[in-house]
Amino acid sequence: MPHRRLAQIADIEQRLLIEAIYQRYHYDFRSYARASLKRRLLAAQTHFQCKTLSQLQDRVLHEPDVFAGMLDYLTVQVSDMFRDPEYFRALRVRVLPLLRTYPSLKVWVAGCSAGEEAYSIAILLHEAGLLERTLVYATDINPQALQSAASGVFDAARVPAFTQNHAASGATTSLSDYYTAAYGRAVFHKSLRERMVFSDHSLATDHVFAEVQLVSCRNVLIYFERDLQDRALGLFHDALCHRGFLGLGSKESLRFSGRSGDFDDFAPEQRIYRKAAP
């Protein structure tokens, strides 16, 4: 069979599988970047020992446990605490002094994965003396990732990299002040988790749930096609208070977005923007 025909069939299978997931489980991956989605679906196909995506679709429709396992492939679970330290340094030096003027704060960490970003934000707020009057909403579509995030437990082998990033962000404390290490694990303190709410939320289908002063959504939009990127940016705009702040990933930009006019540059080199005045 010619290679082109095989590619056409694979493309049809991918679209049908994604539509089946949406119809059966109400998870919408239809506007995710196709090339990235293809790689992840093929990895899931191999993991579940299916010869084709059509066979995987059959299992997904009839075996809910298979879909639960597939979510780990369909959602990106790669992050570090204080990833891209200059971003957190910019938050620390330029954004938090302005947020200090609010009597109470709400922060939305969208696509929180296993919680690395959310705990980084919480520690940053604690160091600025703001955590006690802040609520951090950490959202994701993967329930297993949310459960892991809510536990505050990380592999101790990852902590040296976390510590290095934390110091490079201009930290005023030691990261070891915030966790207890034992049996190969690092458990972050309950005082951090008490100011955090972990919740299921889809940028593809759900709506705004609170007014916030800061949205941090990093390395998520790169996995979306343009229409879904614009939808997500619209949600962030609607959630942000007057002149609130938006932080994106180092490879993400508002430059070519249909929502670019909704935000002003604030620290563009660190991908931090501010909601435009009406």
Image: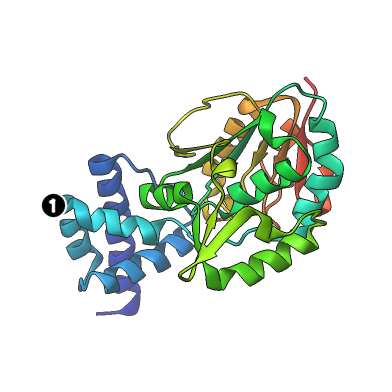
- Give whichever of 215, 264 is nearer the camera: 215
Note whether residue 84 is visible. yes
Above or below for 39 versus 72: below
Note whether residue 251 is visible. no
Residue matched to label 1: 62
Q: Which x, y percent locates residue 225?
A: 52, 50
- Give whichever of 34, 99 is nearer the camera: 99
Mark 1 burial class by Cα count in 10 Å: few <14, some 14-19, many 20+: few
Callout 1 amino acid? His
Say whether residue 110 is left or right of residue 242.
left
**Element at label 1:** helix
- Give whichever of 80, 32 is nearer the camera: 80
Quadrant where the C terminus sits is top right
- Give whichever of 257, 203 is nearer the camera: 203
Q: Which x, y percent locates residue 87?
A: 76, 53
Which coloring applies here? Answer: rainbow
Quadrant where the N terminus sits is bottom left
